[in-house]
Image: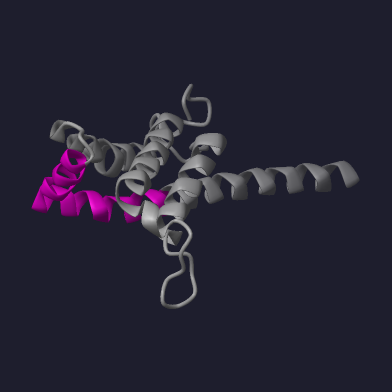
Amino acid sequence: MHTTAVHNHAATAADTTDTGKLLLRAVLAILLLFHGISKLQHGIGFIADILAKHGMPAILGYGVYLGEVVAPLLILIGLFARAAALVVAINMVVAVLLVHTAQFFTLNDTGGWALELQGMYFCTALAVALLGAGRFSVGGINGRYN
């Protein structure tokens, strides 16, 4: 009887782990997609201007579509989730370096870190990259990049 209880606990833990991975992926992807959809609607002129101010080619601004549209969609469905999550993490680092460096050591009006949203996206993306997509994904639990 003890062996059955241990086996049932292990099965339940695996089920909740995959559910947790799905929740983590869905929240990261859906919240990032709002930013991506906004850029699809309004363009990347703002980003192109920032890149130009830093002496970089404006065409690099199109990379935001990878980090805020393509990668989140892949994360959401669980296909190449680890690689897509790394794209999101890199996108967050670039965003902080180009736009938010002055806020790195500051707090907002309510006492939170001024970059808590970017920090949460970055760390959540790293978690997905480390954990993989899990069983509830198009790539499946045994997918090479999931």
Q: Main secondary structure of the magenta part?
A: helix
Q: Is residue 138 left or right of residue 7?
A: left
Q: Residue at x 25, y 56 (%)?
A: 34
Q: Residue at x 40, y 42 (%)?
A: 93
Residue 16 showing in the rendered view: yes
User: How far across and how far down the image is residue 138, in percent?
Assistant: 39, 33
Front residue of 43/8: it is 43
Find the residue positioned furthest to the top.
Answer: 144
Q: Residue at x 27, y 50 (%)?
A: 33
Residue 1 showing in the rendered view: no
Q: Is residue 90 above or below residue 143?
A: below
Q: Is residue 30 magenta?
A: yes
Front residue of 56/23: it is 56
Q: Is residue 11 above or below residue 57?
A: below
Q: Quadrant of residue 92?
A: top left
Q: Is residue 95 left or right of residue 105?
A: left
Front residue of 109/66: it is 109
User: How far across and how far down the image is residue 69, in percent?
Assistant: 25, 42
Q: Is residue 133 left or right of residue 9?
A: left
Q: Is residue 51 magenta?
A: yes
User: How far across and how far down the image is residue 21, in percent?
Assistant: 52, 46
Q: Quadrant of residue 85?
A: top left
Q: Is residue 52 left or right of residue 4?
A: left
Q: Magenta segment range?
A: 26-53
Figure colour scheme: one colour
Find the residue positioned furthest to the bottom.
Answer: 110
